[in-house]
Image (tube, grey):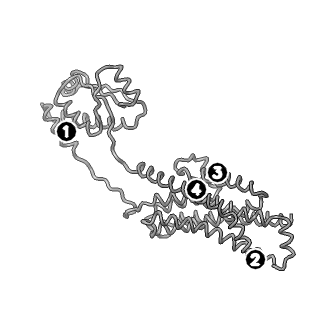
Amino acid sequence: MQVFKLCMNIIKKNLPVLLIYVFVFLLVSIIFTGNMAQDMEKIISFQRSKTNIAFICEESSPLIDGFKEELSKTANFIDLPDDPEKLQDALFFRSISYILRVPKGFSESFMKGEDVHLDKTIVPDSASNIYIDLTIEKYFNTAKLYIRTLDGITQEELVLYLKENLAQTALVEVKANGEKAEDHSYAKYFFNYLSYTLLSVIILGMGALMIVFNNRDLKLRNGCSPVSTTSINLQFILANLTFTLATWGTMIILCLILNYKNGLTLNMLYFVLNSLIFALCSTSISYLIGNLVKSASAISAVCNVVALGLSFISGAFVPQELIAEPVLKIASFSPSYWYVKANNTIAGLTKFDYVHLKPVLSEMLIVVCFSAAFLSVALVVGKKRRFT
């Protein structure tokens, strides 16, 4: 096992550099994974927020008092003087995003069924203002129904009816396939970032081995040694697999420690399986790069270009939902894209029959095909460089 020991010694010699990459990559992954998971949780969870508005009323009536009470459910009333300049300044500096003015005589005209309107000034393209508009329309459209239906209804009676009707709400419960979906957002983002870490570290580690073994003098000496070529190749493959599995295992153990609550789930099992397949694919990519590159400095440069480039376009750093369609089409020609896509699918699984697992298995199979393709090209290139 001389070749295997030599490979381990080379890895050991480069271990300080590799550990720096491992710890830096993992630290960045942990920080960004936690932040991304929290941000996405805020995005997908709905919480009603109140909008700061200026409410300018030129009259006082029971209808307007009731309307203001209902509007307070979606608005914070900011006390501002009825001064156009100060109101415009408040809009400009975003102290408020909505100015609502009730003109004089509004209540009397509205109760008579006349076509009257409230005056508003808003910040353009503000999403929060939509809730204010919906509240206003809902209140006065409902009021119109009562006025048309009940002759002689007073403002006080109308406000009581509206208060009772608009207080009713509906309870909405979202279910996934009839089962409660567990939160795997942390694991999803961790394993997505893991594609960058695995690919970088494996390229650097295997690159160091390939630079040594592709040395022309060493290859000539190995060619006349008593150890057969088959034995050399098998020991070299074993060393590479050992390094790959050790790197992958370190990452997985760390993930299980940090995400121990969801560590014993079927989702986590498929996360781990998917990452193992990608680790082996990274080995094939690294083997190809090692056969093409001829210097240690070039290995580092290629590592940064390949690992960072694939991670950015495939959705490891930025969610695939936010990436433009043309970029995703280009990314689909890389294994990182299918690895990340499989992770996204696994995170949403609540059932694990063949129908639900079929997309995940298909995406894993594509990564395996990429591995075979990279390995085949690497073997052809390596054969041509055997004694050059």
Q: Residues within 10 Å of mark 3 (few under 14, many from 20)?
A: few
Q: Position of residue 320 (x, y in %)?
A: 54, 51
| Amino acid type of the residue tagged 4 in the rendering | Val
Q: Which mark is residue 24?
A: 4
Q: Is residue 283 left or right of residue 352?
A: right
| Amino acid type of the residue tagged 2 in the rendering | Gln
Q: Position of residue 162 (x, y in %)?
A: 19, 39
Of helix, strand and loop, which one carries label 4? helix
Residue placed at 71% from the left, 52% from the top?
Answer: 301
| Amino acid type of the residue tagged 3 in the rendering | Gly
Q: Earlier in the sequence, mark 3 or mark 4?
A: 4
Mark 2 → mark 1, Cα distance in angstroms: 87 Å
Mark 1 → mark 4, Cα distance in angstroms: 60 Å
Establish if 46 lies above or below 230: above
Q: What residue sits right under mark 1 in the picture?
A: 162
Q: Nearer the viewer, mark 2 or mark 1?
A: 2
Observer-nearest of 108 and 299: 299
Q: Earlier in the sequence, mark 2 or mark 3?
A: 2
Mark 3 and mark 4 residues within 8 Å of each other at the beta carbon: no
Q: Residues within 10 Å of mark 4 (few under 14, many from 20)?
A: few
| Amino acid type of the residue tagged 1 in the rendering | Leu
Establish if 297 lies above or below 232: above
Q: Which mark is residue 2?
A: 2
Q: Which mark is residue 309?
A: 3
Q: Residues within 10 Å of mark 2 (few under 14, many from 20)?
A: few
Residue placed at 39% from the left, 31% from the top?
Answer: 94
Q: Earlier in the sequence, mark 1 or mark 4?
A: 4
Mark 2 → mark 3, Cα distance in angstroms: 37 Å
